[in-house]
Amino acid sequence: MEKSPVLIVGAGISGIACAQALRSAGRPVRVVDRGRVPGGRMASRSVGGRPVDIGAAYFTAKPGTPFAAVVDDWVERGLARPWTDTVAVANDSGITGSTTGPMRYAAAKGLRSLVEDLAQGIDVEQGITLEHVSPGEALGESCSTVVLAMPDPQARRLLDASSPLREKLDHGSGWAPSIAVGLEFSTRSWKRFHTAFVNEHPVLTSLADDGDRRGDGRPVLVAQTTAPFAQEHLDEPDGAIEPVSTAVRRLLSLPDAPVNSFAHRWTFARPESQHSEPFLLVDGLGVCGDAWGERSSVSTAWASGDALGRAIAQS
Ligand SMILES: Cc1cc2nc3c(=O)[nH]c(=O)nc-3n(C[C@H](O)[C@H](O)[C@H](O)COP(=O)(O)OP(=O)(O)OC[C@H]3O[C@@H](n4cnc5c(N)ncnc54)[C@H](O)[C@@H]3O)c2cc1C
């Protein structure tokens, strides 16, 4: 008799990786997500008919890991491309140098398109918000396991006060917010860089050249903000546009104001500390995501979801 399906809540990269691992093992899965499209924090927004990455700026993959094989396949099929291994370093007075590190990958159609690609063959139901789950039951239906593939504070909210999992999950104070601000200019008037870490700045933490990342050269920048600055603007993210625009123009010495701009709120952008385990699986409830592993990142989220899917398949 076929087992009842595993219900995965969250169609970010960890939820989809978990679903693929289960599917490969022949286990039935159902994925639901409250958003309109899959991708979670690997999000893009359409501006002037082209995608702009507003969550993760890029991803890395340690050579020889299972995630690197996934990335190689994306690159071979032209879905992802090696972007740069060089990141500019900036502070309030401008770009002061650069640092090299692992290859950063980008996607011509936005990082979200990669999650969509990974989700092929999986039935993902969008626009479904869960309020509550319990072992073996969600959405009024029975399931063999319920997986919460999302930030700890979002997962915590869905669990009974008596659930043993709750105390292992952060309630929110350990997650940093960010406001993403997209700025479109009429021309490219800055000295070339790919992406920048901004240090000791009251407003900015990073800046990415989206035209460079996308490969089409469009004069679009995306800035991410410090957690204290984001905290002040979580209720009204549009209020962040003007101060962020001013900070970016000052940092890059841009003469003109942007012709188009937008803001996006990330209440739980990144965990400030990591769990030592790769996932949690207790009594028919599982939790995975970017907080479960070495360092919050796309590759950690994928590895966490994949490991949880394999563990459920073996159980
Ligand atoms: C601003 C920002 C910049 C970043 N930059 C980078 C970077 O440059 N490089 C990098 O590697 N990583 C970066 N990251 C981190 C990276 O985006 C994440 O590690 C990764 O995308 C997390 O995937 P996930 O599947 O664990 O969670 P998510 O992508 O958050 O997926 C969770 C999903 O659960 C859904 N959900 C939540 N609650 C419910 C509910 N009650 N009912 C139904 N659905 C629900 C959400 O809609 C969402 O789709 C960045 C993140 C942010 C926000």
Image (spheres, helix red, strand yellow):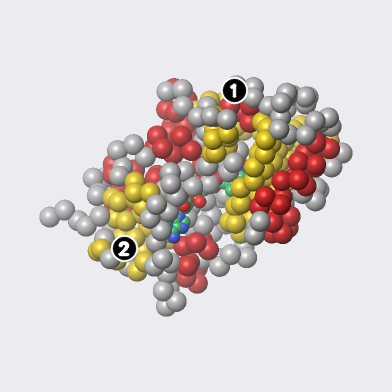
Coordinates of residue 12 in the picture (x, y in percent):
45, 47
Tell me: residue 122, above or below residue 288.
above
For the N terminus, give its image quadrant: bottom left
Coordinates of residue 56 in the picture (x, y in percent):
58, 42
Which sits earlier in the primary sequence, circle 2 or circle 1? 2
Dot 1: within a 10 Å radius of its alpha carbon, few (fewer than 14), some, or many (20 or more) residues?
some
User: Of 258 and 78, which appears nearest the observer?
Assistant: 258
Would you say residue 307 is visible in this rendering?
no
In the image, is 212 to the left or to the right of 126? right
Element type where label 2 sits in the image: loop
Say which residue label 2 marks.
Answer: 139
Say which residue label 1 marks.
Answer: 215
Locate residue 275: give its quadrant. bottom right
Disc 1 residue lies near ligand 1 with CB under 8 A: no
User: Of 297 and 160, which appears nearest the observer?
Assistant: 160
> Residue at 60% of width from left, 38% of height from top?
57
> Residue at 19% of width from left, 56% of height from top?
3
Q: Please, what is the three-letter code of the amino acid marked with disc 2?
A: Leu
User: Farthest residue toward the bottom?
Assistant: 162
> Residue at 53% of width from left, 29% of height from top?
49
Q: Please, what is the three-letter code of the amino acid marked with disc 1?
A: Gly
Tell me: residue 167, above or below residue 313.
below
Element type where label 1 sits in the image: loop
